Image (cartoon, rainbow, N blue to C red):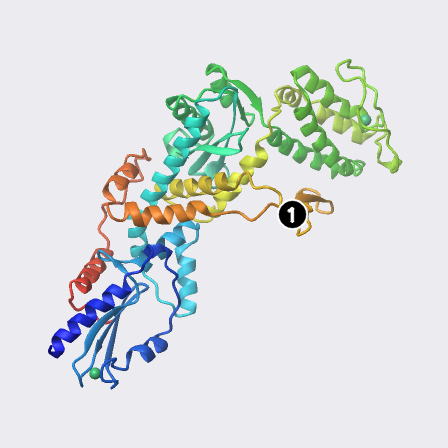
Amino acid sequence: MDIGETVTIKTESANVIAEPPTPVQKTPTYIVYESCLRELLTECPDCKMKADVRMRRWGTFLTVLQNCQYCQYSRRWNSQPVLGSTPAGNLQLAAAIYINGASFTNIEKIFKTMNLKIFKWPTFQKYVQRHIEPAIVKQWRASQDGLLAELSQQQNIILGGGMRTDSPGLFARFGSYAMMDLRNNKVIDVQLVESSTCGGVDNMEVKGLGRSLTLLKDHDVRPDTVVTETRPEIEEFLREAAFTHYYDVGHIEKGLSRKLKVISQKKNCRKVKKWLPTIRKHLYWTAETSTTGPEKMAKWMSIVNHIQNVHVHDDPRFPQCLHPPHTGDEDKWLAAGSPAVSKLSKTLMNKKLLNDVERLSPHPHTTSLQHFHSVSKRFAPKQQMFSFQRFLCRLYLAALHFNENSGRPQATSADGEPLFRVAFLKSQTRECTDKPVKVEPTYGYEEELVDLVFDKVFPDPTPYVEEVLKIPRPPDVPSRFDQPCSQDVVFGYVSVINRGGRPPLY
Ligand SMILES: [Zn+2]
Ligand SMILES: [Zn+2]
């Protein structure tokens, strides 16, 4: 056997060993310093003399050509498995960045700070468009189909819907409409609406709601009750569609609290500040404990007596307060005929508010919806601009994360005691409350997504990409799938490496 044959056999055997026994995406990865690699590769494995080492890099991937001028030993060593023409680590890092809702620019900065090599933005974009977003769309739809199939078998479905805009007021370009199954606390649909396609910001919510309800109908899901914010156009839309429509208590409470706060800052009304949490709680209690509109009204209006230390009421539907007799702070009661009572009564008995109270939902959904919107902010921060498709995919990620973690139980101590944390109330910074600590969130959807990218989408992206292209999008936001990208050139380089050619030196 001559030297050449020996080299060939060794190279093949090295390749066999380099094949990981587990899928590439599940193989542990490490940060390796170049000096440590040189320490490993500079010595010729055959004659132990100093070998010539040349390194070439693409993104996070490094290929090393090792040549010994003394015994002619030669081999190529790759720092990562190469799938077709793609280094696994580049694809995996791009997927990890995107799936975690991280910013590529921030990650790139972090890498730069520690001189850790990474690919450029166009490469990231290429992976996102070819593999990552198609996988996200596929996974969300599979998950959504499962939820809708279950709902199609159920009766008395209660849905809650609400919109989040990407910027305040008239400047909003996108609005994301989320529809939740309130009994199971799951997001069942997300619609991204562009203001220019529905005649302005004011119409975005009803557009999102309409699209969601059409999708549900297509899946044979027949909701009984829909809970939304109080908006006349939504009211009209749902009345025409013959749904039972309730108003979300959280939304009404927010508007009312703003008005009450203004009153509490007025001269002679300072005492009102102490009453704000009670009034807020009373609104929620009214919604939760009443079965009819008149009962809600009677309970709600009793608060005006209560703040004046009167606990017996004229309305037979709620003749007296249910709380035990008060002890302690007698100074808190408001005097009858005082400016505070006059201003509070005017606000609490406002005709529009009373109409809204009559329609209060016994199924509060603001907390869940706000929680989902705060999750979606993590995946699609307001300060960043996204294309339609990018925004939508990030919302799908948020929905996958939310649904996996929405039913998390309360955490317990080592002794089995439920854990709480102290939380400050938003509008009353001096007041705090105990909030249950939930168990740590899980991220099973992330692992499933990475597996989908590697096992299904990467080997044959076309059908997955085609599904993404079918998503209706605003006409002024064209798909960028077929835009040429400088990355094509780099893909070419890796193909060259795999064919045994010489990639360019870096
Ligand atoms: Zn040698
Ligand atoms: Zn009372």
Corner quadrant of residue 503: bottom left
- Closer-to-camera residue (239/327): 327
Q: How far from the left and from the top, in percent, is residue 505?
A: 22, 72
Left or right, 439 with respect to 472, comes to right
Q: How far from the left and from the top, in percent, is residue 252?
A: 62, 29
- The answer to whether any part of residue 381 appears in the image is no
What amino acid is at disc 1?
A: Thr
Residue 102 lies, with reference to residue 314, above or below; the image says below
* SS for callout 1: loop
**Quarter holding the N terminus?**
bottom left
Disc 1 target residue? 412
- Closer-to-camera residue (471/332): 471
Point out the quarter of the image occupied by ligand 1: bottom left
Corner quadrant of residue 348: top right
Q: How far from the left and from the top, in percent, is residue 147?
A: 44, 31
Residue 58 lies, with reference to residue 188, above or below; the image says below
- The answer to whether any part of residue 476 appears in the image is yes
Residue 273 lies, with reference to residue 284, above or below; the image says below
Corner quadrant of residue 124: bottom left
